[in-house]
Image: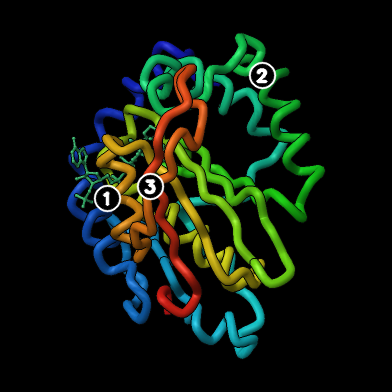
Amino acid sequence: MANPANVLELQVPRIIEIDVGLREAVRQQRPGRRPVSVGGKRELAGRHVSHRLAASGSVSTCDNEAMTVTRPLTPGDADTVAELLRVNRDFLAPWEPVRDDEYYTADGQRAVIEGALERPDSVHPRVILNEAGRVAGRISLSEIIRGPVQSCSLGYWVSAGDNGRGLATAAVGEVVAVAFSDLGLHRVQAGTLAHNVRSQRVLERNGFTRIGMAPAYLNIAGRWQDHILFQVVAEQAG
Ligand SMILES: CC(C)(COP(=O)(O)OP(=O)(O)OC[C@H]1O[C@@H](n2cnc3c(N)ncnc32)[C@H](O)[C@@H]1OP(=O)(O)O)[C@@H](O)C(=O)NCCC(=O)NCCS
């Protein structure tokens, strides 16, 4: 395992190398666009299945083999995720609920991960991978509701050292495809703090639209804070 103090340093040399290619890949990651190669090594498939067709049942599943920016979270990720959370504790603090110290340990993360994996009907957790294939963040579909609602909530974070390289944008594209095709959902919701412009850009680039402001919606950084709510529905995404 990498020394926590070295995690960000290890990621620096490749930033320039992938920046242009990855951003171009993300730009092309719209429905109907062809997959593109990144640096000759990676492929961002994006929305390789029409959400409209998937939602109507004409397409059975999403091709997870083609997903290269995310993969399902496993208990074996506990050490790495805990280490990333420790390295990014100050960076994430303004955007996250207050966590106890246990949350930042491998045992704490193992419990979080196992708890999530025990509830596949309500949570779909994945890790976000950087261009080197290392875990760079987390993304989850949670609060999955069935019946006439067919909706879920989206949450994500990317390690500070991997920010600004299009990873969140690509990862959101992949999990939205999972939501509409694999999980057969109709709607994905996300909420951001009013000043979280980066996250808003990520959502807008993936076809999310603002649907309103929810006062005192979530307890973030120790305060009940207003959130701007976004959604994308299968018909819009297709
Ligand atoms: C929000 C977050 C996930 C973005 O991750 P990322 O991998 O850097 O995101 P991307 O590179 O895909 O896109 C970031 C976008 O924000 C833009 N951006 C970056 N800094 C910005 C700033 N200060 N003001 C405005 N836009 C900014 C980028 O230009 C980019 O938009 P573009 O692709 O249209 O150019 C990451 O910063 C993070 O984890 N933040 C803390 C946790 C968090 O906020 N989670 C989301 C909760 S709703």
Q: Is residue 233 left or right of residue 211?
A: right
**Most foreground residue, 139 or 42:** 139
Q: Looking at the image, which residue is at 52% across and 39% down?
A: 138
Q: CA distance from mark 2 to mark 3?
A: 36 Å
> What x and y, as percent, mark residue 217?
49, 37
Which labelled disc corresponds to residue 213?
A: 3
Report if the beta carbon of the residue with label 1 is closer than 8 angstroms to ligand 1. Answer: yes
For label 1, the SS is helix
> What x and y, as percent, mark residue 39?
28, 55
Q: CA distance from mark 3 to mark 1?
A: 17 Å
Q: Nearer the viewer, mark 1 or mark 2?
A: 1
> What x and y, as percent, mark residue 17?
21, 44
Q: Find the residue positioned furthest to the right.
A: 118
**Does 214 appear above or below 93?**
below
Q: Does any portion of residue 49 appear in the rendered image?
A: no
Report if the beta carbon of the residue with label 2 is closer than 8 angstroms to ligand 1. Answer: no
**Most foreground residue, 39 or 130:** 130
Q: Which residue is mark 2?
A: 106
Q: Which residue is mark 1?
A: 201
